[in-house]
Structures are given as C-alpha cells and as structure tokens.
Image (cartoon, rainbow, N blue to C red):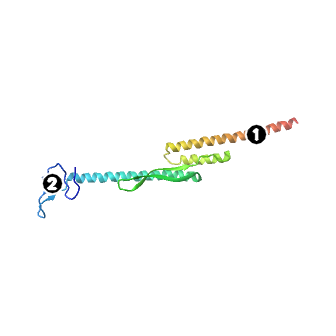
Amino acid sequence: MLVQGPGAYPINSPINSYIKPTSKDKYSHKQNPNAKSQDQLEEQRIKMVVEKLKRIEAKVIAHEMAHKIAGGQYTGAVRYTYTRGPDGKLYITGGEVSIDVSEEQTPEETIKKMEIVRRAALAPSDPSPQDIAVAQTATIKEMRARLELWRKKFEEIEKSTKQNNLSKVA
C-alpha cells in the first residue's frame, strides 16, 4: 500500500531505506522506483483504454451513418449510447437508427421501399444480428409484394385470355 502525497512511502516497509538526510532539511524522501513505474503503467493503461474507446466511437459512428445514408427517408434519427472513459470524457460505444419496414399502398411501392430498407440494413461493413434480421424482414415483405404483383398480372392475363376465347366463340 502506498500513502499518497509528497514524500510518499510504502507502509509496512523499512522507512529508513527511503529516507536520506540532506543539508537542506533533516530528512528527504527518496522516490520509490516502483511507484514511478506503477504510475507510468497506469498512465499507459488509461491511454490504451482511451484509444480503444476512440476506435469504438469512430466505428459506431460510421456504422450508424451507413444505415442513415443508405436508408434515406425510411430511417429515423441516430441515437447513441455513451460510456465515460477513465479520462472523464464521454465516448460513443453503441448506437441505433430506426428503419421503417411497413408496407406501402401498392406492391410496386412496397418492392421499391423494401429494396432500400434491405440495403440500409446491410450498409455497414459489419452488420449486426439486428441488422441482418431487419434485412430478412425486408426481403420477406418484398417477396410477398412480388408474389402479389405476379398474382395480379396472372389474373389480368387469365381474364384477357378468357375474353379472347369468348369473343372467338361468339
């Protein structure tokens, strides 16, 4: 254990090995060589943690901006979560962007929207499991809209074919 302050010395150690008389005063304390290296190690540890937090922050911002840019009008505001670093500053360590996955009025509009939603969900270079789930939802809705569109087109062709056959009979 180390008592903090000027002339600090380890407790439960021979004090005389850290005290040396000088001409200025009766006693002067030698710096504990281990205390200096411990302080340096702690400073290095703090610096490493801060650098890691800065890297995480840059990565999170890039990730969420990729969603935002690719999703355009179908994305909401970016929301970040913060962590206080050992230096007392706040760093972004998480984030989210809401994406509208509701279907549109027509199958054609839904197809266009879900293509954008899927691109937005998969826009970051490292999509999260939640991003992949959103992309899957968009793909399913797009496929349903395509099926509906094909069904309508098939019904139109079938109706047209029946009318042509009836006109040939008459």
Residue placed most toward the observer, 75 or 71:
75
Image point 36% across, 51% down: which residue? 49
Where disc 1 sits, the SS reads: helix
> Residue 36 location in percent, x, y?
23, 54
Q: Nearer the viewer, mark 2 or mark 1?
A: 2
> Residue 76 location in percent, x, y?
55, 52
Neighbours of disc 2 within 10 Å: few (<14), some (14-19), many (20+): some
Neighbours of disc 1 within 10 Å: few (<14), some (14-19), many (20+): few
Image point 79% across, 40% down: which residue? 160
Q: Which residue is mark 1?
A: 157
Is 153 displayed left or right of 20 in the figure? right
Where disc 2 sits, the SS reads: helix
Question: Pointer 2 and pointer 1: residues touching (CB < 8 Å)?
Answer: no
Give the mark nearer the N terminus: 2 vs 1. Answer: 2
Is 45 displayed left or right of 11 in the figure? right
Judge whether 139 appears above or below 23 on screen.
above
Judge whether 120 appears above or below 5 on screen.
above
Outermost bottom residue = 24
Specify the quadrant that holds the C terminus: top right
> Residue 82 location in percent, x, y?
43, 52
**Cα gap from disc 2 to disc 1, whole angstroms:** 99 Å
Q: Which residue is mark 2?
A: 18
Tag 1: amino acid: Ile
